[in-house]
Amino acid sequence: MSEEDMISLRPRRHGWWAIPVNPIFRRYACSRLRLRGGGVGVFLAVLGAGFLFALCRSIGFNRTDYDPMDAERTPLIPLMVLQCVILFALGTAQVAGGMTGERDEGVIDYQRLLPMSPLAKVLGFLFGLPVREWAMFAVTFPFSLWGLVKGGVDPVVWMRLYAVLISSALLYHFTGLVTGMVVKNRRWAFLTSIGLVFGLYTVVPQLAKLGLVTFKYLTIVPIFEESLPSLLPEVPASMVKLSQRWLPTVKFFNLDFSEAWFTVFSQLGLMLTFLRMLCRRWERTESHLLGKTWATGFFIWIQVLLLGTALPEIGTGGLFPSRGMGRLIPMMPDRAPEKFEAVWLSGIYGLFSLVLLYGFALMVTPSPDRQLAGWRRAVKQGRSRLPWSGDAATSFGWIGIMALAGATAWFVFTQRVVESDWFPGQVVPQSVAGWMVGLLLALAWGFQALLELHGRRAVFMAAILVGAVPLMVGAVLGSISDSWWPTAVWVMGASPMTLPVYAAGSLLQIAELPASVARAVPRACAFWGMLAGFAAVWGAVSLRASRQRMAQIMLESGEKE
Amino acid sequence: MQTKPETRRTAIEIRDLRVDYGDFVAVDDVSLQVPAGEVFGLVGPNGAGKTSTFRVLATLMEPTYGEVFLDGVDIQEDIEMARRIVGYMPDLAPVPSDLKVGEFLEFHAAAYGLGTRQQQRDRVAECLEEVGMTEQRKAWCAKLSRGQTQRVVLAKTLLHRPRVMILDEPASGLDPLARRDLKDALRRLVKTGATVFVSSHILSELAEMCTSLCVMNRGKLLAAGTAEEVRRLMGNGGRRLTMKFVSQAEAAADWMQGKPGIEAIAREGESLTLAFAGEEDHQAELMAGLVMAGFRMVSFEERKSSFEEILVEVAESNRKR
């Protein structure tokens, strides 16, 4: 081997931290910052930001009730909206579409072959694909800086705000990368990522109002609201400050966090998980997005976050939707939450945990083909078992652990809500915990067994026929007349999605169901819950038999060889 | 004095390689050794398992099981080192649409850490010259013809001076001149000590450029060796003897029945075609016997089964199954 050849073989690792010299970053900087494309983008960003700056400033200076500093602050919020659109919407879409485009063109294999660590590759794509959007953001920033400095905004406030804006942008770009890795069509990846960001700012805040408080920290909204008085001119700022007196501060269990820190903290966990997903895919294309251990840990982490942010809000009443509304209406500051809210909050928590469980099951459950391949490999290597946490191993036990964690969190949440000072004398007996565990285990294992035995297509069909159709039929029946409600309740109970809500309505003494469904809900819950239990047992037995059969065939074929 | 025979280093070693796609077995327990410094061909009809084998070798796909060593490096143990050793040119050789030829190659040169920026540029220029694309350095990749694209990707594959090159159908889309250039480039590469593993479904094309080759079908390795050895193994000896008589072809056919090596006789007018699997001595005896028996021959021709015929036979056997 010549010296020259030796030089080319000597491992020269690209440090993951050296983003500016990361070859993938530079490759996109080269292609996306050309005068024709990047130049036009930057020009449009300057034009837009300049227009907003001039217009808002002019309006501010013309207002008699604004002093010069107020007027300088007027363009800040419109500029921030523009920056959010550039980074969140355009940037995320570009990341997702760009990643899918690499695969469409077939050049992604070249990137796989580069002798760089998966982390360096992920970071190269993360900062490289949206490099034009970062440049567009950078050219709008001087306008904001002018307003922030001349408007006398406390540097700590705006630095915190921009830190969260950047951390949110990175989180969404990570989401875009994962979307681009999973979605096969470039247009779909583009639309899905924009839909995800749009959903984060429209659907997720509604979830936050329904007890799943932690979700609002995936957006820039909390820190923006906190910083609002400093960004606005004096008069509207004082109004905002007044309303903020009733806004809760961030508490995580008994710990106090600033909005900015907690947002970054919440986003960091998600970013790390996305990073793990991407690195796994760069290491091995065929890998599951997450390994079983990480997925289980992440599921538990989400439950901890949910509980940590929700429980401190029970005492203040901020968790309850009606109380949340009442807080904003000065006439009813002391309005107590209704009992049915506690039941709904519990049901929604259970439902969310179930949906999350299904999502994780889809991520970590091996297809029959993957199990077969795993067995072939194991037999070849002289092993008689599959590695317990490998992608080919069954996810049965892992889903069981997740269901237990979900049910425990659901019970703790329900107990703390119902036994709070808002509902004196109400008690949630320990037996409810057993029912919750049983229900979540049955629904999760039934789903997992179907998925592992018959694959995703069967699950998709079941999701339509068992998950959605009963809900649709029930809704139509319920709309006919009040007398049809019990029938509708029974029909809708066939969908696993209703059972956590039914369980909350049946198991909690606090629940005061309307007379028309007071008998139907507990009975439907018991019947469908039992049926789900039988289905889970049957599924588990079939799954075990199928796995044993597969193992036996493979081990015997190995012995013959 | 006895000298110890020189043992050649093994550049590619495949042990019990298997690749499954669900129930479909794409590569079925293949084992193979390729000595260093060879242009080794892999041939087989479509769906034979060539691309799956190559993707595993290139570290792009995890096999169901099996081990692969490139220059002694286990690709599953040290994937980054393996990626420095291997150069892979995929079938259809895609290029990015948003880069120029020079930028595309410079990106790869930087990713492989080939010295300073100037050294990287120089290496890009060398490789472009090697494939005859120097003038296209500033052209957009998307605007290149199929053949030019192939050559640019070949240049990319050469950049980091890989010890093992894996080329999946590199000659497809190339005009005859470019094919000749490709062959020359491969020969030059081999002279530097590199090993080239190249696939094609056109056997004659491989036979011209390879020192050894192997044939795959339905995931299995059917034969491996020099072109001549493979032809003998695959073509059942593979010789056809065609003889033309002045007359009495039918009588000559009767006379030849049962003679050693003759497997089948076909007559067309005064011509006979023999499927012959005997040794050369048998062939000589047959010729002499015919003349001694008084049969008047106009011509006697020996034709070995062509690679194309062998491959067509293999492909047809697949269809029949």
Image (tube, coloured by chain):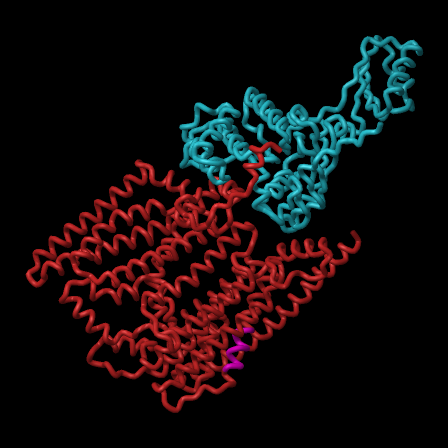
Chain colours: A red, B cyan
The image quadrant where one finds the N terminus of chain A is: top right
- From this viewpoint, which residue is outermost toward the left? A64
**Residue at horizontal 92 percent and vertical 14 percent from the top:** B289
Determine whether, in the image, residue B46 is placed left or right of residue A508: right
Q: Nearer the viewer, residue B114 or B251?
A: B114
Q: Is residue A435 magenta?
A: yes
Q: Is residue A236 magenta?
A: no
Location of residue B273 by image quarter: top right
Looking at the rendering, the stretch of residues picked out in magenta corresponds to A433-441
Can residue B215 be seen?
no
Determine whether, in the image, residue A362 is placed left or right of residue B118: right
Can residue B81 be seen?
yes
Determine whether, in the image, residue B252 is placed left or right of residue B103: right
Q: x, y (%) of residue A316?
A: 31, 80
Q: x, y (%) of residue A426?
A: 40, 89
Q: Nearer the viewer, residue A355 or A219?
A: A219
Location of residue A244 by image quarter: bottom left
Q: x, y (%) of residue B43?
A: 67, 33
Main SS of residues in magenta: helix
Location of residue A396 by image quarter: bottom right
